[in-house]
Amino acid sequence: MAKKHRGRHEASVELTPLIDVVFLLLIFFMVSTEFIRETELKIDLPEASGNPPQTPDEVIEVTVDRAGDYAVNGKLLLNNEIETLVRTLSEAKLRYGADSRLIITADANTAHQAVVRAMDAAGQVGLVHISITTKHPEGQEP
């Protein structure tokens, strides 16, 4: 006796039209996208004219020179890696107390990244009272 097989057809999805549509959408978005041209801005940073607040004795001072090297309370660090700065700031925080203030003094020609790295290290240590030193305008007394 001959067996009749009711054949089940496997369902399949044709991917070729789907890929064509995806490529067309990709081309459309690439052509219609506007790319922003970043321009270099020349800015003149403001100078502080207010009176500086009275600072307590528990002050940690981070000095950043033109090359991006750090000194904490007058002692130059071995390198300018963030791990070294975090370790030194945590030791200073233990020495001066948890509520000590941090003053960042940076050269005017220091890269912004060096100052941000110092602020990041202070945040990792838990120093929240941070001040950045500025110069007084020419011709004015402090």
Image (tube, grey):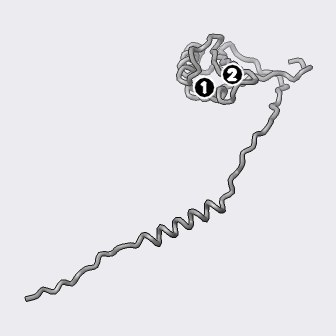
Q: Left or right of 53: which side holds 28?
A: left
Q: Left or right of 131: which side holds 79?
A: left
For the N terminus, which image quadrant? bottom left
Q: Left or right of 93: which side holds 41?
A: right
Q: Residue at x 65, y 30 (%)?
A: 113
Q: Residue at x 80, y 35 (%)?
A: 43
In the displayed structure, 69 sits above or below 27; it is: above
Q: Local crowd at mark 1 within 10 Å, few (<14), some, or many (≥20)?
A: many
Label 1 close to label 2 by CB (< 8 Å): yes
- Give, as a three-letter code, the residue at label 1: Ala
Residue with the most extreme bottom position: 1
Task: Please give the label number shown on residue 10.
Answer: none
- Give, as a three-letter code, the residue at label 2: Ile
In the displayed structure, 8 sits above or below 57; it is: below
Task: Please give the label number shown on residue 122.
Answer: 1
Q: Residue at x 47, y 72 (%)?
A: 17
Given residues 102 and 19, the one toward you in this image is: 19
The picture places residue 126, in percent across and down from the top left corner, at: 57, 26
Look at mark 2 in the image and give the residue it sits on.
104
The picture places residue 55, in percent across and down from the top left corner, at: 72, 17
Q: Local crowd at mark 2 within 10 Å, few (<14), some, or many (≥20)?
A: some
